[in-house]
Image (cartoon, helix red, strand yellow):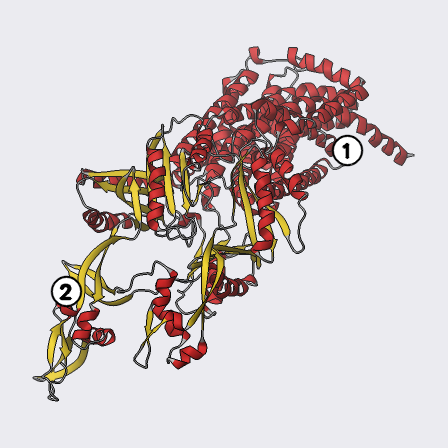
Amino acid sequence: MNSIINFVLKNKFAVWLLTIVITVAGITAGTQMKLETIPDITIPVITATTVYPGATPDQVVKEISEPHEKAVRNLEGVKLVTSSSYQNASSLQIEFEFGTDMKEAETEVVAALNSLPLPQGAQEPSVDRISINAFPVVALSVSSDKETLAELTETVETNLVPTLEGLEGVSSVAVSGQQLNEVSFRFNQDKLAEFGLTEETVKGIIKGSDIIFPLGLFPFEGEEQSVVLDGKLASIDDLKTLELPVVPPATNGVPAQPTTVALGEVADIELVGKAESISRTNGKEAIAVQVVKSQGANTVDVVNLVKEEMKEFGDNHTDFEIIFTLDQGEPIEKSVETMMSKALFGAGFAVLIILLFLRNIRSTLIAIISIPLSLLIAVLLIKQLDITLNMMTLGAMTVAIGRVIDDSIVVVENIYRRMASPTEKLKGRALIREATKEMFVPILSSTLVTIAVFLPIGLVGGMVGELFLPFALTIVFALLASLLVAITLVPMLSHSLFKKGLSAKHTHDHEKPGKLAGAYLKILKWTLNHKLVTTILAIALFIGSLALVPFVGTSFLPEEEEKMMYITYTPEAGETREDVEETVSDIETFFMERENVDSVQVSIGGENPMMPGQNNGALLYVIYEDETPEFAAEKENVMSDVQKFDAAGEWKSQDFSTSGGSNDLNYYVYGKDLETIEPIINEIESIFNETKNIKNVSSSISDSYQEHTLVVDQPKLIQYGLTTAQVGMALNPNGQREMLTTVEQDGDTFDVYIESNTEKPETLDELLKKTIASPMGMEVPVEDVVTVVEGETSDTVLRRDGQIYASVTGTLIAEDISKDSTAIQEKVDKINLPQNVDIETAGVTADMQESFTQLGLAMLAAIAIVYLILVITFGGAIAPLAILFSLPFTISGALLALLIAGETISISTMIGALMLIGIVVTNAIVLIDRVIHKEKEGTTTREAILEAGVTRLRPILMTAIATIGALIPLAIGAEGSGLISKGLGVTVIGGLTSSTLLTLIIVPVVYEFLSKFRKKKLSEEVE
């Protein structure tokens, strides 16, 4: 320790240079860090979607979902397999343990599924990893009053999309609502018959003609030259004028001369445009554009680049209306600005406190340098670990401001106190060296203790653990940096600024305490003389504070209030696209007329990750104005109004909070079939509906389709020379359209699809009366070879870990979630369950229970680690035990503060409580270290306690108030800051206030009491 202090005192210029280098490097690293809302976490979930056209949910379960579940269930790291079987599609969700290599897991899932045979007509499974980077960072819509959809599509796809795809950091650009052009090819059956042609013959001629055939190299005129046979149909006109050979029937036994007929005479060929999905913004037909950033790209940079490009695009197309429906960059920038302003305010407050206590600008300057320098060192280190600048790392820096200054305050205060003492014998370097050394052990142990508190954060698994790891690392790095600054830069600056010592007006005899210290000394003497009364009062205060828990209440994660709603519409079984569009139009109009609504974007059909398998599903993005008051109540009211509309399907508000949680309460009911499960689901749903503070109640028990099973008569099929497959192919309306060829027009290439001439029958009788061509030359009606069996099939079948299940979901809207969830659980527990039926609680209740349990264990582990470090530091068990008595009283102040602030016990407040373990113990260490130091000098325990109390009162109050001041902006901030929120600030401020006051009283009382046992033991050993 001597060598370090001597080095910095002798090489002050080198230390200055190093400080400047670190400052510049830290600022540079900070400006280069990626800005994100939350840490770049890995979501251990893989989805596998398999499309099976025409299949009912029951078919999908048996032929797709069950085999796929079995194939992936035993893969390494698989935690849970859930499947949803819809009409036409199977969706598999495979959840892995946190920490699994998801790239390797994806490869294994693909290999497992590809090894399985698929039923005829089913498409290959689409396997994807769920990633935060897979969601768009910016979405917008483009509309025009002057251009048709076709013209708008041409402009967007030709000019805009390639430009956006070329921007740095952009991974992909998805477009919906655009017009897709293709060539429709429909055979004229009467003309085919007239010319004696068949569909297969014509298709064969087209495919045989529409080729480019390389013939190879020929030695023409002594030189090898390439020859290519080109029969490619270059345009729609080429296709229409393609000549087909025709052999007319013989006349009077005389064969007719072969002739030809143009393809256009036997088929209708035309270029058609159609919208695969519907997209509207504020009632106008629009094209929706979604931009996904690449892995590792900076969200804010990508969004800003897109905005710049769209501004230029808008300037060049003044008749276009461009509306941004999603912008992840702006909230990040606002959050960063908010957190930075809170950090600066907190730092300013801390500086003010130091100045008020020390009343010396130079000593204040020394102390406050540790704030930016410690944080810049932390920035350098987290940049090296490729951690982003997000709400967790910025929140950690805000929280750390109050703590990183503690070490410097303690050292500066000790140097300043000794310089100001008229009885101090040492001067200059010797004084600074000894004053720094005197405080090295307490600041080292207090820093190690605080760091140790964050080690158990690794015990907190799941999403919460992933989110808080960058938070913990940032604080650890900042604290290590503050320790380094306190023993290097602080003594160097003290020597530079106080080279001539202090002036006479700053000298003060610390053996004569001031008014504050004098008042404290009287209280301390009284409590030491009345230990029993003091202890009883402290215990009563602690127990009384625990009684506040029911009034404070509990919740999971703080909600973020982004002024946007995502609303989905799930159609009723059998509902058509036209029905959905009519229903959605009513809601669209409702929102457009709603006060404070800025824009409404509607998408119907197409790909929708929120509703896999729902070809006719709809999604609404409703963006409100920033000044919208009481947005939480607005969301609740608006959904209540929406659900009153006459709609066959289900409207639901989706919650996509970036904090990683929601207030949804779920119950899963498992059973052998849906018939057994349904009564239990209905009973739970009734319990939900009877509960006042739960909204958006729904169950997964789906509507059913009426199902007609056509049982084939095999003997009759054989009689007519038919097979079941032939009947199925003839009746199946969901087969994939056959692409015949491609042609060009105006530089664009179009696919040519053969359209079916048959329309879907509108009644079952029409379907049964359809005829099938028999190889024996006769048309056989379907009703002659099948028998109809009536039944029903659900439109969705859900399975979880191999069992059929259904769920009931509702959103708790009360601040005290535990109260209502407990009341619901008590009623659910009374349900009489049939045999083989089980109920499982999920959603916010399960998440709370798991996370609170893990954080509770983390706190116990933290206390155990802290005690171990203290035992090693102090070389005994008595002092550490006395120090730990400061911890219980953090609860008293924290609970009272939460009650006053109207906050609940949540994950954020639990993290605040975990932090308090390290912060509170620091003050007790500083106090007890001085007591032990004085005892070693020969003073009695009582005298040592009184002297230490008066001497350490100022640094303890300074560090506590500085920390509290640094957190005040977080505690009173109206802005939502996600997990690092008001609750965390309130918890730390309340807990630190009560524990600081009680530390100064209870810890000395406990230490003196325990010291008697130590002395008794020592005397017995001497005897």
Which residue is depicted at the point 56% across and 17% down? 358
Q: Considering depth in this image, is 424 or 348 the residue closer to the camera?
A: 348
Q: Considering depth in this image, is 1004 or 895 the residue closer to the camera?
A: 895
Q: Is residue 415 visible?
A: no
Identity, as a three-letter code, of the amino acid under mark 2: Ser
- Indicate the quadrant where residue 219 lies: bottom left
Q: Is residue 163 visible?
A: yes
Q: Residue 455, how many percent across, how many down?
A: 61, 43
Instruction: Report the side of 423 relative to 408 (left or right).
Output: right
Residue 1017 versus residue 213 in the image, above or below: above
Q: Secondary structure at mark 2?
A: loop
Q: Which residue is mark 2?
A: 235
Residue at the farthest bottom position: 253
Residue 755 - label: none
Which residue is depicted at the point 42% across and 45% down? 648
Residue 733 versus residue 905 in the image, above or below: below
Q: Earlier in the sequence, mark 1 or mark 2?
A: 2
Q: Considering depth in this image, is 406 or 622 the residue closer to the camera?
A: 622
Q: Residues within 10 Å of mark 2 (few under 14, many from 20)?
A: some
1 or 2: mark nearer the eye: 2
Q: Residues within 10 Å of mark 1 (few under 14, many from 20)?
A: some
Q: Residue 675, how many percent across, how many down?
A: 57, 54
The quarter in which the C terminus is drawn is top right
Q: Residue 627, how many percent across, how many down?
A: 38, 26
Q: Which residue is mark 1?
A: 878
Which residue is depicted at the point 60% across and 41% down? 845
- Indicate the quadrant where residue 96 lies: bottom right
Identity, as a three-letter code, of the amino acid under mark 1: Ile
Q: Secondary structure at mark 1?
A: helix
> Are dots 1 and 2 in contact, CB under 8 Å?
no
The quarter in which the N terminus is drawn is top right
